[in-house]
Amino acid sequence: MPQKTQDPKYDIKDDRLINSNTGEPIPVNEPVFMFRGKDKNALKALKFYRDLCTDPEHIRAIDRRIAKFERFAEHNQDLMKEPDSHYS
């Protein structure tokens, strides 16, 4: 059974990121980019991305994610920070 993630579009199954609608795994050679709620730049990036999209259903989904990011930022101002990229 897939493990649910914070993003409704994706789950984890057998240590792989999968599309929760299709059940198909994301290929290991396909790059994936993730924003976290505490990233001070995430909302700007999501809103810019939204403006580039044309599919109304996808735009509604993005709007729902933007609303979650806005609520998180509003209620967790002490956690908001400039992003970093420390890789292990």
Image (cartoon, rainbow, N blue to C red):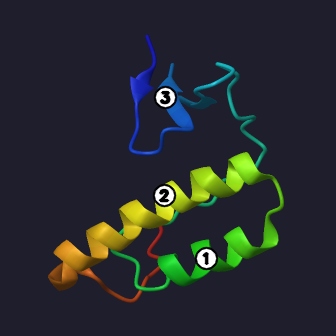
Q: Residue 52 appears in which quarter of the rendering?
A: bottom right
Decide which of tag 3 and tag 2 comes sooner along the chain: 3
**Residue that carries the numbered disc 1 in the rendered image:** 47
Decide which of tag 1 and tag 2 comes sooner along the chain: 1
**Residue lying at the far top of the rendered structure:** 1
Q: Nearer the viewer, mark 3 or mark 2?
A: 2
**Residue that carries the numbered disc 3 in the rendered image:** 12
Decide which of tag 1 and tag 3 comes sooner along the chain: 3
From this view, report whether residue 34 is shown above or below residue 78: above
Q: Position of residue 31 (x, y in %)?
A: 73, 53
The kind of secondary structure element at disc 1 is helix
Callout 1 amino acid: Lys
**Residue that carries the numbered disc 2 in the rendered image:** 65
Q: Position of residue 85 (x, y in %)?
A: 48, 77
Callout 2 amino acid: Arg
Q: Nearer the viewer, mark 1 or mark 3?
A: 1
Circle 1 Cα neighbour tier, 10 Å, few/some/many (<14 / 14–19 / ≥20): few
Residue at image coords 42%, 64%? 67
Left or right, 53 with respect to 7, comes to right
Q: Position of residue 84 (x, y in %)?
A: 44, 82
Circle 3 Cα neighbour tier, 10 Å, few/some/many (<14 / 14–19 / ≥20): some
Residue at image coords 83%, 61%? 54
Distance from disc 3 to disc 2, alpha carbons, whole Å, reads 19 Å
Left or right, 84 with respect to 29, comes to left
Residue 15 visible somewhere in the drawing: no
The kind of secondary structure element at disc 2 is helix
